Image (cartoon, rainbow, N blue to C red):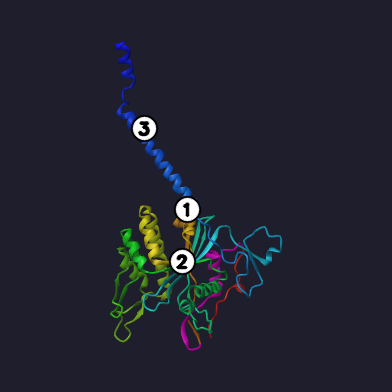
């Protein structure tokens, strides 16, 4: 009897530490997997495919062309503009810190199916006219009628309606760059500008350097230098004036985006800053929908450009307006931004040449 009891006691011996550790690890993995699956399910449930402007109606009242998102239309396809699959357009805007007008205007087309992004700057002094409620240059459209007016003005220039807008308070620029530890950026030109009224002091020499958020904002804001000879102290910082600054802004956007995506562990900070400093008509569900394709984006597939033109155009008593070069601008629009399967043509765009 005693031997049988010893055998029973031996069978109830506790598992070894290795076995217990393995069981604990297995249980942890099961729980973690359940959490991941749950979060992914929540993400899939919450993600909402964004809408497209002009997918079923004419993009402009003056156009006789019908827009559709159905490539299998049975009617005469020459009368239709077909949207590319899963391709969206965005207006990216930053307001001037002093005047409140839109200092930076960019249009982005994101082809999520082919992972291609085009980013094109519209110079702030681009001539768009609209005598009714003023705004002869595009950077005055926002002050005249808000984002809806600016989107319409940009859409008339480009030949297609813009799907969504993102209006940025430049404070996010400073805090976002500081959150990722600054950025390494190649400053393209000598910058020396002082404005005591704004308490603005910009001083950089050309070359690669580590910039804080405040310094990066100064670099992209710089248009003029104030260290010229007496009598004509103020002069353009770039040989091609504001066009040079738009190239710097595009390069900075690309640099910051790459740095941000390289630190996904700071997602919480990014979300907080986004909701604090960004105004957009995209919903949270829309942004979640874009998150999945964006994670696989290669920045080598980002194409940037600035619409070319003549900065000496006039309209009435207004001077130094920027009249777009129609042929060259159309080439850029079709290469970088066109959301349709067929080219945008002259009769679809409005690019006043001044008078």
Label 1's element?
A: helix
Relative placement, left or right, of 131 versus 68 is left
**Residue placed at 30% from the left, 29% from the top?**
17
How many numbered marks have been drawn onto this rendered protein structure? Answer: 3
Q: CA distance from mark 2 to mark 3?
A: 48 Å
- Element marked by disc 3: helix
Q: Closer to the N terminus: mark 1 or mark 2?
A: 2
Question: Can you identify the residue that label 1 sits on?
Answer: 292
- Quadrant in which residue 97 is drawn: bottom left
State which quarter of the image contains the N terminus.
top left
Q: Quadrant of residue 84?
A: bottom right
- Point out residue 249 in the picture as x, y percentages from the top left corner: 40, 68
Which class describes the residues within 10 Å of circle 1: few (<14), some (14-19), or many (20+)? Answer: few
Instruction: Pick whichever, 307 or 197, lies toward us.
Output: 197
- Of 264 and 308, nearer the camera is 264
Q: Residue 104 versus residue 321: which sits nearer the camera?
A: 104
Q: Earlier in the sequence, mark 2 or mark 3?
A: 3
328 part of magenta stretch: yes
Distance in Å between CA atoms under marks 1 and 2: 19 Å
Residue 334, position in %: x, y? Answer: 56, 66
Residue at the image point whose x is 40% and y is 55% from the top:
261
* Label 2 crowd bin: few (<14), some (14–19), many (20+), radius 10 Å: some
The residue identified by callout 2 is 280
- Extreme residue in the right direction: 75
Residue 23's disc number = 3
Residue at the extreme bottom: 317
Task: Estimate the spatial distance between the alpha carbons at disc 3 and disc 1, rounded to whole Å.
Answer: 34 Å
Give, as a single range, the part of the protein colored magenta: 316-341
**Above or below for 34 versus 20:** below
In front of the other: label 2 or label 3? 3
- Residue 122 in picture, x, y percent from top left: 48, 72
């Amino acid at each position: 009897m005693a031997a049988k009891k010893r055998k029973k006691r031996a069978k109830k011996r506790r598992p070894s530490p290795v076995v217990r550790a393995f069981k604990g690890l297995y249980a942890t993995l099961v729980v973690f997997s359940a959490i991941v699956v749950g979060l992914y399910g929540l993400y899939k449930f919450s993600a909402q495919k964004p809408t497209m402007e002009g997918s079923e109606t004419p993009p402009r009242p003056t156009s006789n062309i019908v827009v559709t998102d159905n490539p299998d239309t049975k009617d005469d396809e020459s009368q239709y503009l077909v949207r590319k699959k899963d391709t969206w357009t965005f207006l990216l805007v930053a307001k001037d810190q002093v005047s409140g007008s839109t200092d930076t205007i960019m249009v982005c087309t994101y082809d999520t199916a082919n992972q291609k992004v085009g980013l094109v700057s519209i110079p702030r002094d681009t001539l768009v006219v609209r005598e009714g409620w003023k705004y002869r240059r595009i950077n005055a459209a926002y002050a005249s009628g808000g984002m809806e007016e600016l989107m319409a003005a940009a859409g008339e220039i480009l030949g297609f309606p813009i799907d969504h807008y993102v209006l940025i308070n430049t404070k996010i620029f400073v805090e976002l760059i500081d959150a990722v530890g600054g950025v390494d950026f190649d400053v393209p030109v000598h910058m020396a500008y002082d404005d005591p009224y704004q308490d603005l002091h910009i001083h950089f020499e050309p070359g690669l350097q580590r910039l804080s958020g405040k310094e990066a904002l100064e670099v992209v804001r710089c248009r003029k230098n104030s260290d010229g000879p007496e009598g004509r102290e103020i002069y353009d910082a770039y040989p091609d004036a504001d066009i040079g600054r738009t190239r710097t802004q595009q390069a900075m956007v690309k640099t910051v985006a790459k740095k941000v995506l390289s630190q996904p562990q700071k997602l919480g900070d990014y979300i907080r800053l986004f909701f604090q400093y960004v105004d957009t008509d995209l919903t949270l569900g829309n942004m979640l929908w874009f998150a999945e394709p964006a994670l696989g984006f290669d920045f080598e597939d980002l194409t940037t450009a600035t619409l070319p033109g003549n900065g000496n155009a006039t309209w009435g008593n207004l001077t130094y307006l920027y009249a777009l070069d129609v042929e060259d601008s159309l080439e850029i629009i079709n290469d970088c931004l066109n959301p349709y399967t067929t080219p945008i043509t002259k009769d679809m765009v409005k690019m006043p040449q001044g008078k």
